Amino acid sequence: MQQVQVCIVGGGAVGLTLALGLAKADITVQVIDSSAPPQPLGELFANRVSAISLASQTLFEQLDVWQDMVAQRVMPYTHMDVRDKDSFGKIAFNSSELDLPELGHIIENDAIRYALYNKLKQFSNVSLAFDTRYQSIHQTDSDVLITLGSGTPVMAKLLVACDGANSAIRTQFKMPMTFWDYDHHAIVATVKTQLPHDATARQVFLPTGPLAFLPLHDEHHHSIVWSTSPKEAERLMALSEDEFNKALNVAIDGQCGLCEVAPDRAVFPLRMRYAKQWLNNKVVLMGDAAHTIHPLAGLGMNLGLKDAALLIELLSRDLRDGFANHRTLREYERARKLDAQKHIAMMQGLKELFEGTHPLKKLVRGVGLSMVDKLGPLKQLFAKQAVGK
């Protein structure tokens, strides 16, 4: 039997970040993931990327892994341009207005995972079990027993479920959740553009949903996230590449010149999920297993990393005062649930405001964005929220 202090099910970016933080605190960790180990980046850009906030960057720097991400493909962006397609509203700001070197970074999710995975392999107090499934999970008042597919038992003081939006662990332990369909599907793809991106992250709010153009490491490549109605997403995905390129160029108002989409565009439904209960004795939820939100502000990954940062801090403190005790786990649950609730409400409000063609909504959007753009203090507040400051 293998004994560890923390077992993490899920080897995504959030789970591996938690593992690295705990490893650096001399906490023994077992990571279990059914997928293959992270691999080096290929020549082509992956179509799943994250806008990493300055707070998340700071966490990676503290874990001594940020430079490993930068050594791959990381794109700092210094400008942000947000506009409403259906009104005169627009807001634009740049990092110099906030006395910052950049507003954030666009990073392929694969690059984040690979850097974390490589760093974790340097720690003797971490066991990494990829290509591995578990048979069963049972817990007592003080421990959790995880039996691997091979039959090997792992005993842990705490089990952290980082196993995604459709978390099997959340289901097994009957942790209730609230959810609703955003009535949006997100199309993700890599797009080569005629004009350079100039380190600018762009977002256009269309009547059917937002379209984001995120700058990649090559100045003529963007990653796009086009959130739209399921019917419109089906239509767009059925278009030929040439037809899709034309539709994309019209939607972005030609800001980036002619577009050339890569052949691996993908689509997935968007749903809000929020676990009402994040803690069941010695089992806790984290990241997408606990919450998923609309990607229109690029906050999903950063919310999960905030979950990891707090649990690292609390469990490191627990080394002096009873490891993973109930008081500590409740502190994690209360703090992160509150933050997730705020962001879920904010995303729902933004989605409803910027969706549709009602004249009053168009007026509010236009006046609101223009006022924010022209009023210095309000604009600075908006900008700081956008970069996670």
Image (cartoon, rainbow, N blue to C red):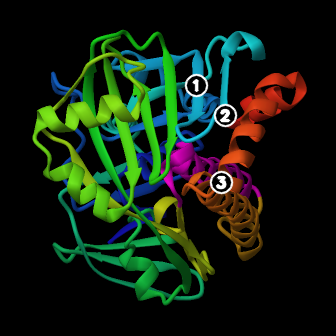
**In the rendering, which numbered label is found on residue 16?**
none
Give the Cα distance between marks 3 and 2: 13 Å
SS label for mark 2: loop
In the rendered image, residue 158 lying in the magenta stretch gets the answer no
Q: Mark 2, mark 1: which one is toward the viewer?
A: 2
Q: Return the residue nearer the eye: 385 or 367.
A: 367
Q: Mark 3, mark 2: which one is toward the viewer?
A: 3
In the rendered image, residue 294 lying in the magenta stretch gets the answer yes
Q: If the image is split into quadrants, where does the N terminus sit?
A: bottom left
**In the rendering, which numbered label is found on residue 359?**
3
Instruction: Answer whether labels 3 and 1 touch (C-beta < 8 Å).
Output: no
Instruction: Answer whether labels 3 and 2 touch (C-beta < 8 Å).
Output: no
The answer to whether residue 111 is seen in the rendering is: no
Q: Return the residue nearer the eye: 226 or 20.
A: 226
Q: Earlier in the sequence, mark 3 or mark 1?
A: 1
Residue 267 drawn at (x, y percent): 26, 54
Q: If the image is split into quadrants, where does the C terminus sit?
A: top right
Give the magenta-colored segment's residue range. 293-320
The residue identified by callout 2 is 89
In the image, is residue 281 above or below residue 26? below
Q: Residue at x 41, y 30 (%)?
A: 252
Q: Quadrant of residue 142?
A: bottom right
